[in-house]
Image (spheres, rainbow, N blue to C red):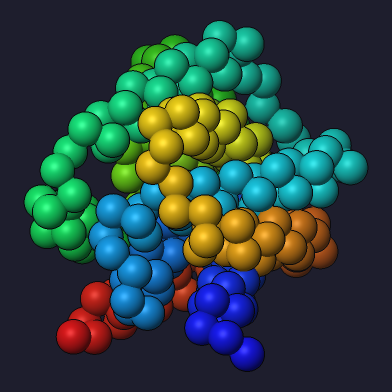
Amino acid sequence: MGFVTQQQLVMFLLGLPCGIVAVTAGGGVTLGIPLLMLVGTAADSSVIAVKVALWGAFLTGSLTHARRLPEAAVAIPWWLWPMCLVGAIFGSQLLTVIDPAKLRGLVLTLLIASIIGTVWATWSNKKVNAAPSRFQKVAGFLIVLVLAVYSGFFGAGYGVFLIWALVTLHGHSPSTAAALGTRLSLIISSASVAVFVGRGVVPWTITVPLALGCAIGGALGARAVTLFGDNLIRVAMWIVSILAAAKLLVP
């Protein structure tokens, strides 16, 4: 087995847990970037490869979620979708103009911040708000827009924060928030992929096998949410936080 084949196998295997986590706890980027950096991938290539590869997880996860109607679904205005698309394009363009030599330090800083935020969001009271006020809804939409820009630029912790916002400010349960978050992430990820492909910055050798693993993981994760519900979301959030923190401590 040649080096390239071994590398592709490693990327495929890394993609499986990233895809599962992406459509459950929403931490595919938080988990994927330190894993790729751990096996020797450069910071800029890790960020772009993971963000492009997770498109496969969001696609298969959305298709799996679409086979059933989420219970107690909360109506979302149509303009939220193009708003997220525009935000993601802006964030992705910003990522492509940053000097790769300076990106590693920024990536590590954002990863640490996202892990702290992930732990906070997991600890915070995620009681379903069945009747959010108008102020809470407006605040929720603004937070989703900011998260779309952040996801296009970097995205670590984005899914966890999105689930928190949908539960706290919009009245979703963790499982229906995960289903809606997967669909929103597909739109946002599509914008990022288009920008990265258009600028010719995608490391396809590692991205293709990583995306295949993510796609399979996304289908498995979405199915697991259907079977196990909210408890899986909470447990997966903890697993993402602990694993990501552990990887950052490895020299």
Where does the image place residue 12, in percent across and percent down from the top left?
A: 61, 71
Q: Residue at x 56, y 9 (%)?
A: 79
Quarter-of-image position of residue 72: top right
Please determine whether, in this image, residue 184 is positioned above or below residue 26.
above
- The residue furthest right is 67
Left or right? Give the position of 73 relative to 250: right
Residue 170, horizontal then vertical, whole percent:
53, 29
The percent position of residue 65, horizontal first and vertical second, equals 78, 45
Q: Quadrant of the N terminus?
A: bottom right
In the picture, the quarter occupied by the C terminus is bottom left
Looking at the image, which residue is at 62% across and 19% down? 76
Question: Can the viewer see residue 171 in this picture?
Answer: no
Q: 63 or 159: nearer the eye? A: 63
Foreground residue, 82 or 89?
Answer: 89
Q: Is residue 140 left or right of residue 18?
A: left
Looking at the picture, does residue 51 appear above or below residue 197? below
| Number of numbered discs | 0
* Apparent side of residue 197 relative to residue 105 in the rendered image (left or right): right
Residue furthest to the top in view is 79
| Picture layout, residue 243 above or below residue 159 | below
Query: Which residue is outermost to the bottom?
Result: 1
Which residue occupies 24% across, 85% down? 250
- Asked if residue 238 lies left or right of residue 111, the reply is right
Residue at (81% x, 48% y) in the render: 64
